Amino acid sequence: MPTVSKIPRRSSGEAKTNWTSEPLDTEPSTSGDFFKIFRTVLEGIVEAGGDLTSKETSESMHQLFERQDLKALIALHQFVSKHRFQSASPANGRLVQSSREVINIVQELTSSSEGQELAHLLNRVHIQALFSAHDDVANRCYEPMLPEIPHEVDEDEGLAVKVVRLVKQNEPLGATIKCDPDGSVVIARVIRGGVADRTGCIQVRDRVIEVNGVAVAGRDPTEIVKLLAGTNGTVTFKLIPADDEFLDCGRSTGVVDGSRPRVRSQFDYDPTTDPLHPCPEAGLTFRTGDVLELVECDDEHWWQARNEGHVGVADPSAGASTDCRVGLVPSRLLQEKRAAVARKTHESTTAPSVRGDTLDSRKNAKSASPRVRKIVYESHQAEELDGEQPRSYEDVSLLYPRAHFVRPIVLAGPPGVGRNELKRRLLMLNPDRFGTTIPHTSRPPRPHETDGVDYHFASRNDMEHWVRQGLFLEYGEYRGNLYGTLADSVRALISQGRIPVLNPHPQALRLLRTAEFKPFIVYIKPPPFPALKETRSTARARSTQDGGYQRGFSDDELEQMLASATNLERQYGQWFDYELVNGNLEFAFRELCELLQRVDAEPSWVPTCWVR
Ligand SMILES: Nc1ncnc2c1ncn2[C@@H]1O[C@H](COP(=O)(O)OP(=O)(O)OP(=O)(O)O)[C@@H](O)[C@H]1O
């Protein structure tokens, strides 16, 4: 019989991997198997009625067993059978230490450049990190060291008891407890993705019998929280599992992954200052305008949510998440109840007063007096109007960009912050792409002014009529003449395919922020006082409080700008899609241009009613 060709051996200089416990170059002993196969083939021929003694059969058999591919196949089969159950295992778990030793030896014994380079390479942080990861895996350091679970199987009132042991780390346990009227302590909530949830062993309505060997029945929840806070290392819960009927609400259906609803918060929230929060350490902090992903909304008063940050423009694939932790936040119902109570308290403690004039043209349109009242642009009036709205959450959805779809860009900000300057630069940069509205006025044209260029000149009667019809986005009276911007002038720009760049009075935001216009609102924020003063004086900025633009800003005016900015944020912050700090003008303008490109190309969060 011809010999079976061998699996090629590795040359002696070839490196072996550390991860095999046996060498791979064992020569396979093939003869036994070969004869087994030979016998099987012969039996097959006899069964098929073949003649083993014929010359024909012996020749074809000879040819068959001479074939190189058959020999290689048999050898391969044996090799795989021999090695298939061998798993990789490390030679040792001391690579970091060994490398240190090598470095010391090399540095002591040689001053050659190769030696120094080797020491340098071994010393590199990435290589050391790789060695350290190797040692961690080799020594299985990634597995938490859990103490032995007690062997005794507890029975409590005939019910099965489960013992769950958690390793306490830097994150909260992710479960809240409550006391039932009968004194028993139960798991009230399990926070999605938290430590307790990840164990899969703690469910809503599980009854807590002991925490670290201390019986908890009849204790106050705050006592139990203290007990938990005081433990280090591991926490052992003895629990009676929830009835089956409750198991489903532990891993609640609420919402489906991937299509979870989002809301935009209209208020700042800090769980540590909320006296109602059932477990502040499991709470979520967020700011006005942050987008929250709702993970569980089954509970009437407390939702589970994840904060995705202040994302006016969102790339859902990239995920703008600032904190991937799920935490407890007040539900819409709870927040609205709170706002109602606060309003009632406020009303009962403040004397009734006559409301000042408002800019809301629709309100004015309904009033009996046809006369347009004089408007004073002051933020305390805005507070009266917009402060009435209870702050909770606004449902938001992604608005995807479409060809030929134009969204007005609204620059909001305190007077003097630079909205006109930024608008002017945008219009100069690309007059075909950006446009702005031309206001109407009832004052007669001045010699150098052209109708339709500087202003649309109209009669006072017409303008008062339009005010009563609610056609103005904003209007006001100055030195006996009316000025105003018609909503139709925004529509005209959109129909030309140009992006309206608007810097209206903040009270016009309410009228602009509609499903029809779908504006993107950029809040132009002044930098802190020192930077504000420095940038404005370096650029010889002109105060907008001085009618003739003759002088720079005084310190008082800059302080006033900052105060007015704080007011605006409080009143309208929930509508700002983006906050742009106008410190260095060049940087701010570049940021604005980049932002507008993103608004054009990427989906953004908008009120859900805008996309339905
Ligand atoms: N980042 C900046 N650095 C320096 N100067 C600036 C900056 N931004 C704006 N300015 C200057 O500040 C002055 C006021 O700016 P601008 O007229 O744009 O303010 P505004 O927000 O439109 O105010 P208003 O609403 O009262 O008209 C102008 O002289 C402008 O050139």
Image (tube, rainbow, N blue to C red):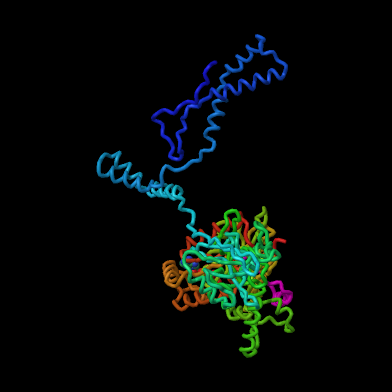
Q: Quadrant of residue 107?
A: top left
Q: Quadrant of residue 18?
A: top left
Q: Quadrant of residue 305?
A: bottom right
Q: Residue at x 59, y 65 (%)?
A: 154
Q: Nearer the viewer, residue 176 or 535?
A: 176
Percent x, y of residue 454: 61, 67
Q: Nearer the viewer, residue 56 or 390?
A: 56
In the rendered view of the protein, which quadrant contains the N terminus? top right
Q: Residue furthest bottom?
A: 351
- Residue segment shown in magenta: 451-472
Q: Nearer the viewer, residue 382 or 201?
A: 201
Percent x, y of residue 386: 63, 77
The reply to whether residue 322 is visible in this rendering is: no
The reply to whether residue 302 is visible in this rendering is: yes
Q: Residue furthest top?
A: 55
Q: Nearer the viewer, residue 209 or 612?
A: 209
Marks counted in the figure total 0
Percent x, y of residue 403: 67, 53
In the rendered view of the protein, which quadrant contains the C terminus? bottom right
Q: Residue at x 62, y 77 (%)?
A: 183
Percent x, y of residue 590: 51, 58
Q: Residue at x 63, y 85 (%)?
A: 345
Magenta span includes 137: no
Q: Is residue 480 above or below residue 112?
A: below
